[in-house]
Image: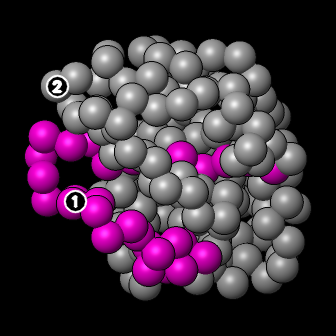
Amino acid sequence: MKYVVFLRGINISGKNKIDMKILKKYLIDCDLFSNVITYLNSGNVILDSDIKDEDEIGNIVRKIIRNDFSLDIPCYVTTRDELLELLSNTPSWLNSQDKSIYNNIIFIMPPYDYLRMSKELGIINDKYEKIYNYKDAVFWPFDLKNYRKTYWWSKTSLGEVKDSITIRTYNTIKKALQLCDK
């Protein structure tokens, strides 16, 4: 089965440094994964595995990172088909071509859920940001020039929510899907 793994909070401002080429080697060497591809330096991994449990995949990847990089990094694991379904449910108002808008997707890691996250983050500033929840992901585009005026931007790195979500751009998700088909 084809899986996509998003590592949370790596290689940001010199923190939680993980060399993706080395991680790829460790993932291949464990003999549980094949066709391993890493994309960007922000923790995007595409891989095949006979393991049929996303939690087990995440636990194995976390253990490898803990053992080989001495870091405890949360992982969001999904399948190619689940990502394809997510993008097929993109809200009609999302315009991925508008460069003045930063199109994000927030992935919520269980057992955390949308209700808890939205309660912690509060309401949005609908002048500068929008949200659309689909299953365990939230489309969250915002005005790039005015990101500091959004209500959610500063809160996504605070409290319980910061360790329970990982954020990717819409274009990164599209690219991850393309890489799944290689």
**Residue 41, quarter of picture:** top left
Query: Which of the two residues, 114 or 75, is positioned nearer the viewer here?
Result: 114
**Residue 48, quarter of picture:** bottom right
Mark 2 burial class by Cα count in 10 Å: few <14, some 14-19, many 20+: few
Q: Quadrant of the N terminus?
A: bottom right
Q: Which residue is mark 2?
A: 145
| Residue 117: % across, % down | 69, 36
**Residue 42, quarter of picture:** top left
Which amino acid, mark 1?
Ser
> Is 65 on the left-hand or right-hand side of 10?
right
Q: Quadrant of the C terminus?
A: bottom left
Q: Is residue 15 magenta?
A: no
Tell me what residue is drawn at x 81 percent, y 50 percent. Answer: 110
Q: Which residue is mark 1?
A: 96
User: In whole angstroms, how far apart are the C-alphas of marks 2 and 1?
Assistant: 16 Å
> Is 98 on the left-hand or right-hand side of 116?
left
> Is 33 on the left-hand or right-hand side of 90?
right
Q: Which residues are magenta?
A: 82-110
Q: Element at badge 2?
A: loop
Tell me what residue is drawn at x 44 percent, y 80 percent. Answer: 88
